[in-house]
Amino acid sequence: MQTRRPAGGLESEVLAALWAADRPLTPGEVSDAVGGELAYTTVQTILTRLHRKGAVVREQAGRAHAYRPVIDDAGLAAQRMRAMLDRGGDHAAVLTRFVGTLTPDDEATLAKLLGAPAPAPPGDRPADEVDS
Amino acid sequence: MHASVYLPLFIAGLFGLTAPRLALRLPPAAATWLLSVGGLIAAAGAAASLTLLGFTLVAQAQPLAESGHWSITALRHEDPVLAPVAAASIVAVLVLAVRFITAGVRRACALLAAHRLASGLPPVGQELAVLDDPAPRAFAVPGRPGRIAMSTGLLRMLRRDQRRAVLAHERSHLSHRHHLHQTAAVLAAAANPLLYRLPAAVALSVERWADEDAAVTCDRRSVVEALTGIATDTGARRSGVILAAGANDVQRRVRALQAPVARLSIWRVALLVGLLVVAVVAVREAAQDTERLFELAQAAYRSAHR
């Protein structure tokens, strides 16, 4: 089989593979699902990028991470907020102003989320960390 | 005015009839360009003919003749165009202009809506947009950048090579701007009903084009299988500028994919291009005839007002 791919197409293929699966996939499984000829590190890089953009969420699966795609209204809004934040430059300043506009109810929700020991269910909040 | 003024009308009819058939036997990229740009030229030629025919009657109106300094009597006497023919041409020009403008506005609205959709589909910033829909659907949404939409139902149904084929197919629609070719065909058909077959012919030929591009990414059989998979979906979305994979003439496309690759036949191309060249030359000829007619009428006006 030929393997000619456009430069930006790999993210689409990985995303398509994640959607095609009925469970979260580890980078190795993604590599298989996309086509075995892709290097593990390439898949890892793409998954990290997708995660940073909020297109997938990550769960712990043994020693590796497993990824699954995100799509719902809340996830979409979160992605947009994330994108705006990335465009804004100074995160602290943007977040300070943003929190300043929240209603007391929203503030309470936010405080609860940040103070809660257990993380919110995946998919309900934006991907808020970047792979190290 | 000679018979040349009627020639572009005849050619528009001939092009509208033969081009869709001939295009099926050409490589899809060449076929698409010939149909879309050729259709616009054929429509423009016919519109120019009708305008020239109608103008000889319009010019007989008193105020226009006064300001143009030509003699109405001379015009009526020298003009070989029958008044009913000229009158029918005027009506046709007006009706077709309205059709053309309406189609243009509708098309522009559809393109704008597609652009908005392209920037709004989740996940934002990603080429692939996934629709949570059990029905197998895939389409390309033109925009900046364009997006590829696939339903979850389709993604779960396809094998990995088929997924790649569908992605490549939709990407081909976007990168070759197939929606603009379709727009050209729709406008040509609006401007001239003789070209009514062009939109369907262009739709089929851009699908073939995208199929061929998909067949470069993976083998032909995968493309065919993916195609027939999507084709079973009866609810395939076909609104305006959004190009849906599998919506168009799947059987013909499968046959085209399985047949040996169409060769670029110089004769078929030359026939279509030749028709268009004749139309353009005929319009030029008719315009010169008209100019001569008015020069005569102006000379008559001058001698009458001396």
Image (tube, rainbow, N blue to C red):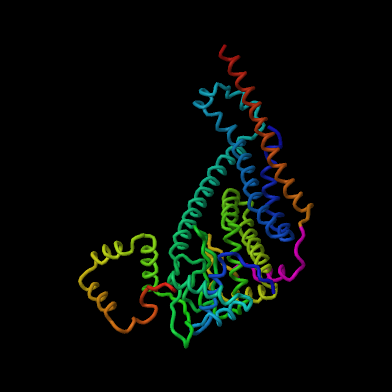
Q: Between residues B75 and B7, which one lies in front from this camera angle?
A: B7
- Residue most toward the top? B306
Picture residue at 20% right of the left edge, 71% below the top: A104
Picture residue at 51% right of the left edge, 27% below the top: B64
Quadrant of the drawing holding the N terminus of chain B:
top right
Quadrant of the drawing holding the C terminus of chain B:
top right
Residue B142 horizontal/vertical position (percent): 52, 60
Residue B171 horizontal/vertical position (percent): 58, 64
Q: Is residue A51 left or right of residue B295?
A: left
Establish if A56 lies above or below B19: below
Location of residue B51 by image quarter: top right
Q: Is residue B17 magenta?
A: no
Q: Is residue B31 left or right of residue A76?
A: right
Q: Is residue B75 left or right of residue B22?
A: left
Q: Is residue B223 left or right of residue B103?
A: right
- Residue most toward the bottom? A62
Establish if B289 lies above or below B31: above
Q: Is residue B249 magenta?
A: yes
Picture residue at 62% right of the left edge, 55% below the top: B196
